Image (cartoon, rainbow, N blue to C red):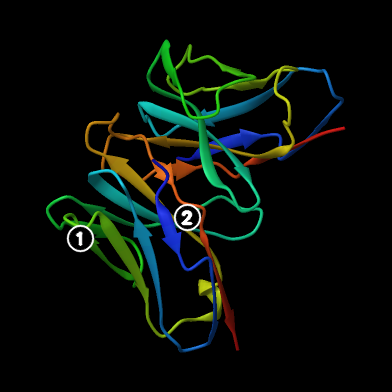
Amino acid sequence: DGGITQSPKYLFRKEGQNVTLSCEQNLNHDAMYWYRQDPGQGLRLIYYSQIVNDFQKGDIAEGYSVSREKKESFPLTVTSAQKNPTAFYLCASSTDSGTEAFFGQGTRLTVV
Amino acid sequence: QQPVQSPQAVILREGEDAVINCSSSKALYSVHWYRQKHGEAPVFLMILLKGGEQKGHEKISASFNEKKQQSSLYLTASQLSYSGTYFCGTEHRGSTLGRLYFGRGTQLTVWP
């Protein structure tokens, strides 16, 4: 079955540590996105990529980094520079404009 | 560029109707609607495209007023399964197509 997979579902890290969230899709989608969700805030775009080896900052990119070495994979690194990293992170993919975005199940990151 | 959703929350009895509105300050190319249950991934409901074309997967209707830069989602004869948070996502003309800006969400609760 085609889909988009995020792992792990829950992640705990100590303050000051970098952590990488995985996102893999087998839908053959060109575009992939990372969103952060906080209570009452909606989904805010961190980074997006429309093609392999290219990506753009979204609205809240500070303290995050990404790579897009393969079409199927778009990992997100939450660095120690991110001031408030505890949140629910969602990865999504789509084929083109005007088409639905498919979301992964999310990773809930807790930094203590 | 975040669209504004209203109302913030709705409480219904099973069988009642609801309308959720989404308004943008920017010219729209398309409007996407998603529903999210707590702790889960958003699920696609509908896309409304410039020119009036609709693409949806459920028995939920919506409207798209390009001139007013608004969309409304109509939930009729609500069921318990309709409970969740509804998000609109907007694609803007003049912006990167495929990139969505999400509203803060409307929390819908349906009681038996």
The amino acid at mark 1 is: Asn
For residue A44, the mark is none
Instruction: Identify which residue is drawn at 43% across, 17% down.
Output: A55
The amino acid at mark 2 is: Val
**Nearest to viewer (mark 1 / mark 2):** 1
Secondary element at tag 2: strand
| Mark 1 to mark 2 CA distance (whole Å) | 23 Å
Task: State whether residue A53 is above or below residue A75.
Answer: above
Specify the quadrant that holds the C terminus of chain A.
top right
Secondary element at tag 1: strand
Residue A97 appearing in the image: yes
Q: What residue is disc 2 on?
A: B43
Q: Residue A28's x, y, as percent?
A: 37, 29
Question: What is the crowding at mark 1: few (fewer than 14 residues within 10 Å), some, or many (at least 20)?
Answer: some
Task: State whether residue A41 is above or below residue A15.
Answer: below
Q: Residue B37's x, y, as percent?
A: 59, 61
Residue B111 shown left or right of residue B96 in the figure: right
Q: What residue is disc 1 on?
A: B65
